[in-house]
Amino acid sequence: MLKVAVLGALGNMGRQVTRVVLEDPTCELVAAIDPANSRAEVRCAGVPALCDISYLNGVDVDVIVDFTHATASVSNIMWALDHGINAVVGTTGIGDDDLALIDAKARNGSANVLIAPNFALGAVLMMKFSEAAAKFFDQCEIVEFHHRGKKDSPSGTAIATARRVGDVTPAAQAPSTSESEVIECRGGRLGPVNIHSVRLDGLVARQEVIFGSPGQTLTIRHDATDRSCFMPGVIMAVKAIADMPGLTIGLEPLLSI
């Protein structure tokens, strides 16, 4: 049985992860970590929610699942690698320099790391379809929608999609914004792709990838209407991470796409 510790356990995603770990007969929830619980008085699915990863010292853990924030996540990943514990990470906003450090440490150690910008299988397919479409269009913009509590913008999914599109699209010159009366109304630019971030109550997550060429547009859209859609991907990664050496980015290797 896989022994799993959930970091960020009291957050929206963390609570979902603890639920599916408890429901899976091949997994055991051995710890829940969340700094929001400073006195370890709150229980998460019957397990005390501890306030710091250091409480895992001496606990038998096979995998940590991290849904925290970028700064904390990097520290958590490094701690896990130092202790020979595999890490599945859904936290976004981790920079390239930190990814390089994680990669080097994972390649030279005994534990592995998987970081995915999105664990929804539909979102993974959306990125794959967008990459395919980008070969035939030279114009692309992304509009991503999330709840107001999301700390980073643009989303990790939008950044990953833009990079994949930018790697293959024959980019056209962006139209001039010199006559715009509203600063940055054209969004932020990553390579050849403009990204627009919307943050509103009532949303979970949605992304539209819009391609254009003379006389036509193509829109590829994914909607996450409930956070439960991310859980099959999380559990899939938890079960596979031991056989994925070093650092893996995204779920694509697990889906063979």
Image (cartoon, rainbow, N blue to C red):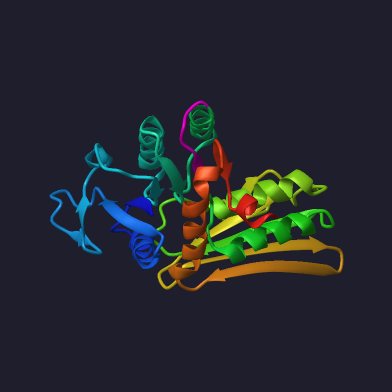
**Depth check, front residue: 164 or 77:** 77
Q: What residue appears at the point 76 percent right and 67 percent down from the top-left corner? A: 218
Residue 158 occupies quadrant: bottom right
Predominant secondary structure, magenta span:
loop
Residue 211 pos. (x, y %): 75, 61
Q: Is residue 181 visible?
A: no
User: Is residue 111 part of the magenta span, yes or no?
Assistant: yes
Locate the C terminus by quadrant: bottom right
First to last magenta residue range = 108-115
Q: What residue appears at the point 19 percent right and 60 percent down from the top-left corner? A: 43
Residue 20 pos. (x, y %): 39, 65
Q: Is residue 138 visible?
A: yes
54 left or right of 158?
Answer: left
Q: What residue appears at the point 49 percent right and 32 percent down from the top-left corner? A: 102
253 left or right of 107?
Answer: right
Locate the N terminus by quadrant: bottom left
**Depth check, front residue: 195 or 173:** 195
**Depth check, front residue: 178 or 117:** 117
**Depth check, front residue: 72 or 216:** 72
12 left or right of 153?
Answer: left
Residue 114 pos. (x, y %): 51, 45
User: Is residue 232 part of the magenta span, yes or no?
Assistant: no
Residue 83 pos. (x, y %): 36, 33
Residue 121 occupies quadrant: bottom right
203 left or right of 176?
Answer: left
